[in-house]
Image (cartoon, coloured by chain):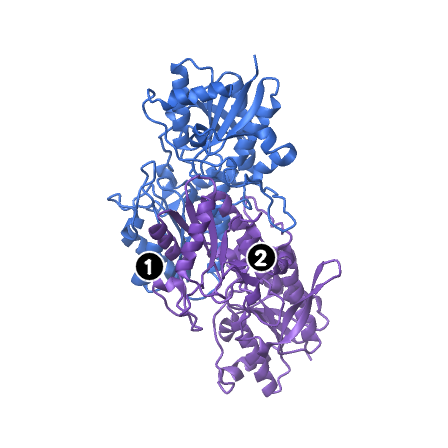
Chain colours: A purple, B blue
Amino acid sequence: MAKKNLIVGQSGGPTAVINSSLYGVVSEGLAHSDEIGEVYGMVNGIEGFLEDRILNFREALPGDKLEYLKHTPGAYLGSCRYKLPESLEDPVYPLLFEKFEKLNIGWFFYIGGNDSMDTVSKLSRYAAMINSPVRVIGEPKTIDNDLVNTDHTPGYGSAAKYVASTVREIVLDASVYEKKSVTIVEIMGRHAGWLTAAGVLARKYEGDNPRYIYLPESDFDTENFLKDIEKALEKDCCVVVCVSEGIHDADGTFICEYDSSVGTDTFGHKMLAGCGKYLENLVRERLGVKARSVELNVSQRCSASLISAADQKEAVFAGRFGVQAALDGITGKMVSFIRRTEADGTVRIECGLEDVNAICNEEKTVPADWIINNGSDVSEKFLQYVLPLVQGRVEVPLGEDGLPVFVYRK
Amino acid sequence: MAKKNLIVGQSGGPTAVINSSLYGVVSEGLAHSDEIGEVYGMVNGIEGFLEDRILNFREALPGDKLEYLKHTPGAYLGSCRYKLPESLEDPVYPLLFEKFEKLNIGWFFYIGGNDSMDTVSKLSRYAAMINSPVRVIGEPKTIDNDLVNTDHTPGYGSAAKYVASTVREIVLDASVYEKKSVTIVEIMGRHAGWLTAAGVLARKYEGDNPRYIYLPESDFDTENFLKDIEKALEKDCCVVVCVSEGIHDADGTFICEYDSSVGTDTFGHKMLAGCGKYLENLVRERLGVKARSVELNVSQRCSASLISAADQKEAVFAGRFGVQAALDGITGKMVSFIRRTEADGTVRIECGLEDVNAICNEEKTVPADWIINNGSDVSEKFLQYVLPLVQGRVEVPLGEDGLPVFVYRK
């Protein structure tokens, strides 16, 4: 019988290392040529797979081209936001498994966040239902760091490093004038403040900027916020604060909703825009000082120049680990990270496997006792948590044009 | 008689290498200890100097701390936007020169853009008027690249590298979904499109994104823009365009003014906000496709992770060159860059000296014949111009927290 083939897809928003996870899966898959035939990629996730859009990695990224995946931002395979039907009786499931059979797929990998783990859950449950031999494994990915049952997720460390470095640069930039000014940095994160909290790394001494950090885990009170800012301006002429895009008041109304029109995405999530802009205008009008807002925007998830070496290494390792597990017959699991702290304080990250059904559609937020000063700062515990995740630099090769060299599908 | 002292200040908006220019001036000043006594810095430019806020570099950045200036963004000395009075009869001039005498200043350096060269012009003319021996030299700085009589300015190359790399990452990020989408990247530049034009470096093949590039040197027609976008969407589902913050219609009305309230800064410049946001809404409403805008914002001028090695080297060299010129008795000049192209095409940048009076309050824009396709793109000539300016990488040291190490005044 012909060797079974492996297929891998990417789903949801990109991160700086989602292609490192892909590299881990593909390189490990190719390394097991005794057991695995071809290594395929789904173009645009499960949605593209349904339209038979696939590629073969041996042809798409031959030789050392594959190595370039490790520092290429964006999702090399393309992504999708496609939610499989809740009912396993839906005709899409037999359709998918017919396609798996036609391609002689033995192993299915899906790299993504909560919504992608929902896909992994459904496919693995359907496989069990029909006694299909296809092994289905989830590879975690999200800059939001909001997956449960894992210490952290690939993509978070690089995004945190980007946020911290950029906030530090913004602090230096904002500090050049003597005029009183307030700078509001708006950071991604709808319900979980992990990424916003990383702004604390930019603080170099007590009382340094960013002066306050507001996460969506706490209710945000605009009057208290204005009092915080006034107090800070008494001491310093330049005040920088970090706010999560998802901050909301005690009634649950997003602060950005006071300013902007909102819609919903295909998963029913509210689409947010502009709490930074809203607070900027509020500060200017109410406190009469120069105010500015900076939305860090998509660079948080696609900056190659601030990839954390630790994050990249872990993403590759999680990819490899998933392939080894699948070859051992494991299915319906997500690769997780477990933190081991040695006696000397050194932190070591190991991979584990967690039931994907317990992960999908759950959200992990920043623990309440890590949020201090009436919701305007994060504690030392958070700092100890995040430090190992942002270590090291990745040297991205430069081309003749002086710019980073990436791989892409044309 | 005691040796004369040197003083240096920074003015206007920061760049990624304004501190490299400072490093060039200070290190060269300290190296000439046979002729130069102390090397002072004005804190917050001429405005802080009037309040006697100065520092001594031997104390502020002893030993190898000085080297850290080369990769530290923001203006280490702090900056100001202070315009000296037009009339040289104003009492501020004798006051300033009394302070120079009290500090035994022999050489005055000011690092900045057009407005700062206005300060250099006035001080050097006043010095000539009263037969003062103080030598006054301007060191160019601006990400806008809009100073006349110089091939380019320190700060532009790094900002261009940041813009090009980030636009490339945004293109990869925007390309992951199959859904039709338009991404508008808003880039700094009020009247000169040099920085926006650098977006062309992100294009990897003909027809690749960024599909269009709109500079403020051309009149912007929103109906033609919508037609351009529609045409691009016929071929590709993901369209990315670069627009300068200063694009305006044929009547001279800034596109952002159709959306936002505007004010003026201390130099009477219009304060701009949001042409990207305006065009995003326009595309969504008129073309019914997913639209997004990204304002690259202050990172364009303060990102340390994408400093161009060529830019940094030139900034340091311009600083050193200025000190050597001042020691030779030169005054009332700005250090300029001259481009020499060898027979084999190699580009070499040399320093020159230009009359500061011919530079201040002038603006250099992108030549009309470098702007093509009815104002929606830039030509190969621009590409050849910008390529040597974005070459090379600067390794910024990382601290124990995994973040770049900068120097700062507390």
User: Which quadrant: the N terminus of chain B?
Assistant: top right
**Residue linked to disc 2:** A158
Q: Nearer the viewer, residue A6 or A252?
A: A252
Q: Vertically, is B7 above or below B168?
A: above
- What amino acid is found at the position of numbered circle 1 in the picture? Asn
Q: Secondary structure at mark 1?
A: helix
Q: From the top left corner, tell me how far across and down residue B317 is, in percent.
A: 55, 29
User: Which quadrant: the C terminus of chain B?
Assistant: top right
Would residue A161 be found to the left or right of residue B223 on screen? right
Name the quadrant containing residue B368: top left
Name the quadrant containing residue A129: bottom right
Label 2 to label 1: alpha-carbon separation? 31 Å
**Residue linked to disc 1:** B281
Disc 2 sits on a residue from what chain?
A
Residue in the picture at 63% in, 32% down:
B62
Q: Nearer the viewer, residue B144 or B56?
A: B56
Q: From the top left corner, tell me how far across and down residue B152 is, in percent.
A: 46, 33
